[in-house]
Each structure stands twice: as C-alpha cells, then as structure tokens.
Image (spheres, grey):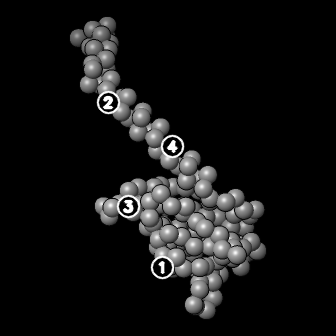
C-alpha cells in the first residue's frame, strides 16, 4: 500500500462518527474532572507554609460518599490548625516528622512510613516538628457535597 493511500485510510478511520463521538466524550470527561479538581481546591483554605495538592477524587459504591486523595506539604515549624472532615481521614507520612494532636488522645509524632487513622468529625491538628519540609498523603472517605475541611476555633 502506498503512503498516500495509508494516509487516506487513516483519515477515514479517524473521522468516523464513532471516533468523533468518542473524542468528544473524552474531552467532556477531562474538562469535567478538571472543573471538579478546581472546585475542590477552591473550598480549601490557603495557609502560609502549607501546600495542598489534590491528586484524585472519585465517587464510591456507597451512595453519597466519595474518596479524595491529597498530598499535603508542610514547611518546618508550621502548624495546620484544628480542623475536622465530614468523613474518615487515613494519613500516610511520606517525608519528615509530623506531630498530630487528635481530640481525646495524647499528641503523637510520626515519621516517614508511619500511618494514622482519624475518625469522621474528630478535631485534629498537625505540626511539622522536623527541620525539613514534611509531606503526607491524606486519603479521605467523606460525604459528597460537603466541604472537605472545616477549621475549628
């Protein structure tokens, strides 16, 4: 087959109604997920020395619940004040040392590789007690449509 006829066949394949519909559907899904992540970022308060990076957000098989994963980077000496979530938080410390204060428990310091479970609605706070930026992977199983984080005075 000549290169001219190969190119013509590729144009025919790529321009079929099924391929066009599929391309439009993929574009809509990508745009929708981008809007969702921007909305998730908008609901989270900005704090000096703390960077929250939304990684993913998905509906669960449990009606009204969703899973959200966020990477949280905290500069040395910086504290993330008292707050709650409308569901469970599962923490995996990626780097550094973080001290967690969880309502009803003694403060605990975790290092890279350590994990922590925080029950729904429990007031808690975190502080980087190390000399390098500390990072955690926070996985939330929360009620859909509610703010992911609520600061507590």
- Up the image or down, 32 lies above or below 60; here it is above
Pointers 4 and 3 in contact (C-beta within 8 Å): no
Q: Which residue is mark 4?
A: 34
Are there few (<14), some (14-19), or many (20+) residues within 10 Å of tag 4?
few
Q: Earlier in the sequence, mark 1 or mark 2?
A: 2
The percent position of residue 80, horizontal first and vertical second, equals 68, 71
Q: Which mark is residue 119?
A: 1
- Tell me what residue is drawn at x 41 percent, y 39 percent: 29
The quadrant of the image that shows the C terminus is bottom right
Single out the mark in the foreground, 1 or 2.
Answer: 1
**Residue at 67% from the left image edge and 60% from the top image edge:** 45
Q: Nearer the viewer, mark 1 or mark 3?
A: 3
Asked if the residue under mark 2 is in contact with the one under mark 4, i.e. CB atoms within 8 Å, the reply is no
| Marks 1 and 3, the one that precedes in the sequence | 3
Please state the horizontal and vertical placement of residue 17, each as a whole percent of the image: 27, 20
Q: Which residue is mark 2?
A: 22
Q: Earlier in the sequence, mark 1 or mark 4?
A: 4
How many marks can you see?
4
In this rendering, would 88 be left or right of 18? right
Q: Which of marks 3 and 4 precedes in the sequence? A: 4
Q: Quarter of the image holding residue 112? A: bottom right
Distance from Cα at disc 1 to Cα at disc 4 = 29 Å
| 3D distance between C-alphas at marks 1 and 2 | 41 Å
Q: Residue at x 37, y 28 (%)?
A: 24
**Quarter that holds the N terminus:** top left
Q: CA distance from mark 4 to mark 2?
A: 18 Å
Find disc 3 in the rendering and name its residue: 64
Q: Is residue 21 visible?
A: yes
3 and 2 marks in contact (CB < 8 Å) = no
Q: Position of residue 99 (x, y in %)?
A: 65, 81
């Amino acid at each position: 087959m000549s290169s001219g006829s190969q190119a013509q066949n590729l144009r025919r394949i790529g321009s079929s109604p099924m391929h066009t519909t599929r391309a439009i559907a993929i574009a809509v899904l990508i745009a929708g997920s981008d809007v969702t992540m921007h909305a998730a970022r908008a609901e989270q308060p900005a704090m000096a020395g703390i960077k929250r990076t939304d990684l993913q957000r998905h509906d669960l098989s449990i009606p009204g619940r969703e899973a959200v994963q966020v990477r949280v980077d905290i500069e040395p000496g910086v504290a993330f004040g008292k707050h709650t979530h409308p569901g469970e938080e599962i923490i995996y410390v990626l780097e550094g040392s973080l001290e967690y204060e969880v309502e009803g428990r003694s403060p605990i310091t975790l290092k890279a590789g350590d994990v922590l479970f925080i029950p729904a609605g429990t007031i808690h706070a975190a502080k980087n007690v190390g000399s390098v930026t500390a990072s955690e992977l926070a996985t939330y199983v929360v009620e859909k449509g509610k703010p992911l984080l609520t600061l507590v005075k």
